[in-house]
């Protein structure tokens, strides 16, 4: 069998090996059905059990209150960037606050501009997106339709330690790249969403957790598949959902509950993994340079540069030779990036740490 | 290992066994990568090869001309029901012709009404949707934004033998449930689309084939993920596409090309399968009653009723005992339905035919 490498890709990203093994074992036929998960009806009892368990697992892990719906949608975070202002901003006569702290919140802001008036509550661009804002820096307009944030910026590797206070407006959070990596206080959010392909499953499903009063705001002139209210009434089965991707979300959340032991434990493990890398960077006397200010450092994505850009290519090549793969930085910023989501084993991070130490010693 | 049954589900539906076996074999790591297809970056060379091959296979199978784009999108046919009028009707001051010949075209018509003026060019409802229209029955408005049709109605089992003539308006076709089941003359269509989960792959990807001049009509005030022009410029990689579903489409189209030998051969095999069932129905002296008029009969979905409704339950139960599953009709029409897509082996249809003959003899 093909040897698996350590995959530091920012997403689609590494999945827990026990999840892949269970999916592989049952791929020709789900136990008790004689039908593959790829072929099974979304109206079948077997799939009902899967989607209900996936939702129950998410409710347990995140402590989701009863007045929030959990939706399994398609289209990735980018469709949410459009749907949020289509449903909650257009036609309201209000403004929406956008906190712009990296590439993804900037993209969400740009999409929202097609639908209504958008107010930039903070812009990290002049700082090269190297940190998240302090509460005192936020310039929020009052009576906003909502306040939008991105809890972890995958490309710049900046992450909020705690939620900002959005005042009287509902807080909407793109949590795509730190979803399920640590506990959250759901009551602070009007809506929290995440594409699955970092911590929750494969590409092709987006999880939207939304408070009932926000769902009720959807205007009637929107087609069904971009209308939160219609989607919520359809309970993720308005049309055929991405059945396989939801099945993997069920397996991943089973793993988080039963093998990891919940999000407190996951967060602690993630912190230990991240510290291994930040320590090397901090002790390298500038050989490695982290992007984010320490207080805003992401526990999920660790972007760094080698001070001498001529080292980039041999660094990536030698890492790959040891099975440490997908470490190239995003094409928009260059350098390197180690994405160390939930499913990246600490052994993989230790190997990367050891390699970074060794490469630094040899080339300093 | 779990024994596989014959799955007559209307979708998600049966997939070719060699496709499932290859996906299973490689699920932990794609050859040459050490990374699962569920984990692989959509920007990687390995995935590039997969999506390009999937497109090339579709172009070969369907003879798609160079002035058509092939897009792999999310959201199912239902998102297309909304996107088509959002992109091509809203704000044009024109009307769109809708040919309503079953549940799905009716649904598409209802979604379009939220975006602009819709003209019903033919309505099969008074006939209980038991056939498609004749060309002479179509009442098309001139200078329409487009004319919309559904080539095969999954629930009613009616299918066009040849494309209707839409005059000067671009013909848009929902081919979800007969895509890749027979050759089509792409030049007759402005756009043809299909969700994958009947003939092309698992749920989670929708294939849109669209002529350049229609793509160019998308208005600028639409968010990216519902804007055909932006999506086409992004070449299906505007955001993370449903990588696994596209991989399965690649395997299914490989199978069609290399193991079946193309769409002419597939169509002939599909016709033989369908005739096995229609023959039993026609020779049953009314014990089984088909829904569609013979000239409109679908080669993909064979809905039928048992004249005595008390026979429904024992029929379905005894069929399931023989491994003939998912034969219950759609909840909106009742009765039975055998969906016999490309991947349903003729052996499965023969077994169903034999069972139908036997059940009729015993209970007549």
Image: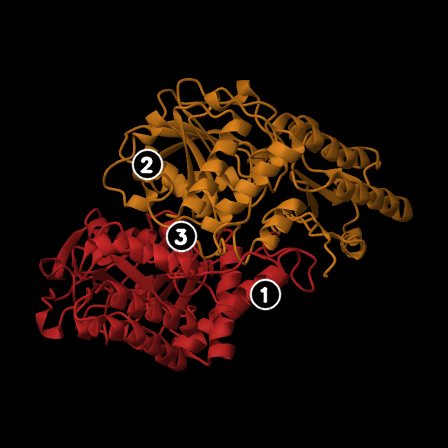
Chain colours: A red, B orange
- Real-space Cα separation, disc 3 to disc 1, in angstroms: 22 Å
At 25% across and 64% down in the image, what residue appears?
A157
Nearest the eye: A228 or A176? A176
Secondary structure beneath label 1: helix
N-term mark: 3 or 2: 3
Whether tag 3 and tag 1 are in contact, CB under 8 A, the answer is no
Residue hosting label 3: B41
Label annotation for residue A22: 1
Please determine whether, in this image, residue A220 is positioned above or below residue A161. Answer: above
Discs 3 and 2 carry the same chain letter: yes
10 Å crowding of disc 1: few (<14), some (14-19), many (20+): few
Name the image quarter holding residue A23: bottom right
**Which quadrant of the structure image shows residue A11?**
bottom left
Mark 3, other Cα within 10 Å: few <14 / some 14–19 / many ≥20? many
Distance of mark 1 from mark 2, alpha carbons? 42 Å
Closer to viewer: mark 3 or mark 2: 3
Quick check: B141 above or below A238?
above
Residue at (43, 74) in percent of width and height: A59
Residue at the outermost front position: A362
Residue B73 position, x and y percent, is: 42, 43
Do circles 3 and 1 both sit on a common chain?
no
Give residue B87's mark. Answer: 2
Q: Which mark is residue A241?
A: none
Q: Of residues B264 and B359, which is closer to you in this image?
A: B264
Tag 1–tag 2 contact (CB < 8 Å): no
What is the chain letter for disc 1? A
Residue B103 can be seen, yes or no: no
Q: Is residue A105 visible?
A: yes
**Helix, strand or loop status at disc 2:** helix
């Amino acid at each position: 069998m093909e040897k698996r490498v350590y995959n530091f890709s920012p997403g689609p990203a590494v999945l827990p090996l026990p999840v892949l093994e269970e999916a592989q074992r049952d791929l020709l036929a789900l136990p008790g059905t004689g039908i593959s998960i790829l072929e099974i009806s979304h109206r079948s009892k077997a799939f009902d059990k899967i989607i209900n368990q996936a939702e129950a697992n998410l409710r347990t892990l995140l402590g989701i209150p009863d007045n929030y719906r959990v939706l399994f949608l398609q289209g990735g975070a980018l469709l949410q960037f459009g749907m949020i202002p289509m449903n909650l901003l257009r036609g309201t006569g209000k403004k929406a606050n956008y906190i712009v702290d990296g590439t993804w919140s900037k993209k969400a802001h740009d999409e929202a501009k097609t639908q209504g008036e958008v107010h930039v509550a903070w812009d990290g661009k002049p700082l090269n997106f190297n940190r998240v804002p302090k509460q005192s820096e936020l310039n929020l307009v009052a009576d906003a339709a909502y306040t939008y944030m991105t809890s972890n910026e995958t490309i710049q590797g900046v992450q909020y330690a705690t939620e900002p206070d959005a005042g009287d407006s509902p807080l909407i959070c793109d949590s795509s790249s730190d979803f399920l990596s640590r506990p959250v206080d759901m009551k602070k959010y009007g809506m929290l969403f995440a594409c699955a392909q970092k911590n929750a499953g494969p590409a092709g499903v987006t999880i939207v957790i939304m408070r009932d009063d926000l769902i009720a705001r959807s205007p009637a002139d929107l087609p069904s598949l971009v209308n939160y209210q219609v989607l919520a009434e359809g309970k993720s089965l308005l049309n055929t959902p991405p059945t396989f991707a939801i099945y993997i979300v069920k397996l991943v959340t089973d793993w988080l509950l039963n093998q990891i032991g919940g999000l407190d434990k996951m967060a602690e493990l993630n912190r230990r993994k991240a510290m291994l890398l930040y320590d090397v960077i901090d002790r390298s006397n500038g050989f490695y340079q982290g992007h984010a200010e320490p207080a805003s450092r992401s526990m999920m994505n660790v972007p760094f540069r080698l001070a001498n850009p001529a080292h980039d290519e041999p660094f990536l090549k030698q890492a790959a030779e040891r099975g440490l793969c997908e470490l190239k930085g995003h094409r928009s910023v260059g350098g390197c990036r180690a994405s160390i989501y939930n499913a990246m084993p600490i052994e993989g991070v230790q190997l990367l740490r050891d390699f970074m130490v060794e490469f630094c010693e040899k080339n300093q």
